Image: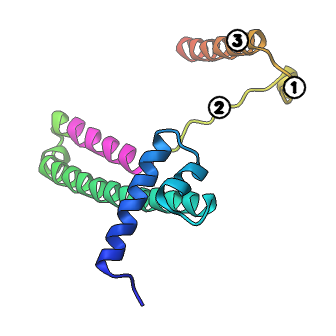
Amino acid sequence: MPASKAQRAATAKRRSQAIALRLAGMDYQTIAERLDYADRGAASKDVHRALEANLEAESVAAATLRELEVQRLDRMQAAAWAKAAKGDLKAIETVLKVIDRRARLLGLDRPARTEITGADGGPLQVEAVDLAELERLITLTAGTAADDENAEDVS
């Protein structure tokens, strides 16, 4: 039989209190003792359930907002489309900006792939790296990227 409204309200209140205590730095054993959970595992499970439910609710809200933004972008593109199709450069620029924004919002752009190789294009061997060595490697890769960009500018 489903829980009554009063039971659901009591559960929500206890979960809220458990989260507040956890955020305050309390361990699960203390939370269990203060809020009359059967044991520390029950307190932990309840906190995790509450956090997961909150994440799901936030995910739904984010998806709804994302869809709303896509609809706005669609309307903006439709408003500029006719002029862009006739060759109006400003309208074309506007449409391209809208398309770019939509692609970023929806994650449609493929991420740039970066690969670091060792001598002769082979795998880079790295073992027990200290901070100085890590900084040296970063400097090396930054220099390589700058060289690549300069080579493209020259050609």
Where does label 3 land, which residue?
Answer: 135
Q: Is residue 58 left or right of residue 72?
A: right
Vertical position of residue 51 compared to residue 11: above or below: above
- N-term-proximal mark, 2 vs 3: 2
Mark 3: which amino acid? Answer: Glu
CA distance for labels 2 and 3: 18 Å
The structure residue drawn at horizontal position 21% and vertical position 38%, both measured from the top left corner, is 94
Residue 88 in which image quadrant: top left
Magenta highlight range: 92-109
- Of circles 3 and 1, which is in front? 3
Q: Secondary structure at mark 2?
A: loop
Q: Is residue 57 magenta?
A: no
Foreground disc of the pair 2, 3: 3
Where residue 111 sits, quadrant-wise, is: top right
Mark closest to the chain's N terminus, 3 or 1:
1
Q: Which residue is mark 2?
A: 114
Q: Position of residue 122 (x, y in %)?
A: 86, 29
- Classify 7 as above or below 36: below
* Cβ atoms at labels 2 and 3 below 8 Å apart: no
Residue occupying image coordinates x 37% and y 55%: 58
Q: Main secondary structure of the magenta part?
A: helix
- For the residues bearing labels 1 and 2, Cβ distance under 8 angstroms: no
Q: Are marks 3 and 1 in contact (CB under 8 Å)?
A: no
| Residue designated by label 1 | 125
- Residue 41, disc: none
The x and y percentages for residue 98 are 26, 43
**In the rendering, at what x and y percent does residue 16 appear?**
39, 55
- Residue, x 50% and y 57% (percent of image)? 47
